[in-house]
Image: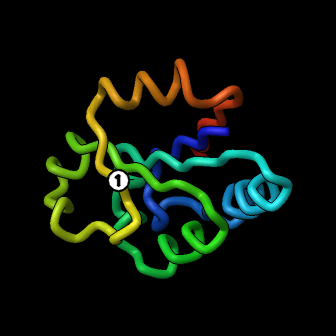
Amino acid sequence: MLIILSKSTFACSYESVLKLAENASSKGEKVAVLHIQDACVAATMELHCVRLADARIRLYALKADCEARGLLGKLGKDVKVIDYGEWVRLLMKDRENIVSWTS
C-alpha cells in the first residue's frame, strides 16, 4: 500500500491515515507513505517519522516539493527523498493499493 499525503499536518489530521497504515503494516502488508506538497512538513517532524518507522512503514518525500519549501536539510533520518521518476516506480511497480489522503 502506498499512501500519498499532500496536506500539512496543520491543515488536517493524520491520525486516521496513520492508524490505517499501522494496521496494514501489523498484518504484514508492505506499506509506504509518500509526502508531497505541504505534507513534506510532516516529514520533518520527529514524532511523525519515528511513529511510522517503528511500525515498519517506509517514508518518502518528493524532492522538488521539499526543495520548494526549504526542507531538505530538515527531514527525518528515515525519510528517503525521491524524484518524480522514483514516484512513478512506486506507483507502477512497488505497490498494489494506493491511497491519496487529502482531508
Q: Which class describes the residues within 10 Å of circle 1: few (<14), some (14-19), or many (20+)?
A: some
Label 1 sits on a secondary structure element that is strand
How far from the left and from the top, in percent, is residue 79? 38, 60
Q: Is residue 79 left or right of residue 26?
A: left
**For the view shown, which residue lies furthest in the front direction?**
28
Q: Front-most of 76 and 35?
A: 76
Q: Residue placed farthest to the bottom in the image?
A: 47
Asked if residue 8 lies left or right of residue 92, the reply is left
Query: Residue drawn at (73%, 62%), measured in percent from left and top?
Result: 22
Which residue corresponds to the image point at 23% horizontal and 51% vertical from the top-left?
66
Residue at screen point 33% across, 71% down: 77
Residue 46, placed above or below residue 98: below
Residue receiving disc 1: 80
Q: Quadrant of the N terminus?
A: top right
Count of marks overlaid on the render? 1
User: Looking at the picture, how far across and down is residue 55, in whole percent?
Assistant: 66, 68
| Coordinates of residue 86 in the picture (x, y in percent) | 35, 30
Residue type for callout 1: Lys
Q: Residue at x 40, y 66 (%)?
A: 78
The image quadrant of residue 88 is top left
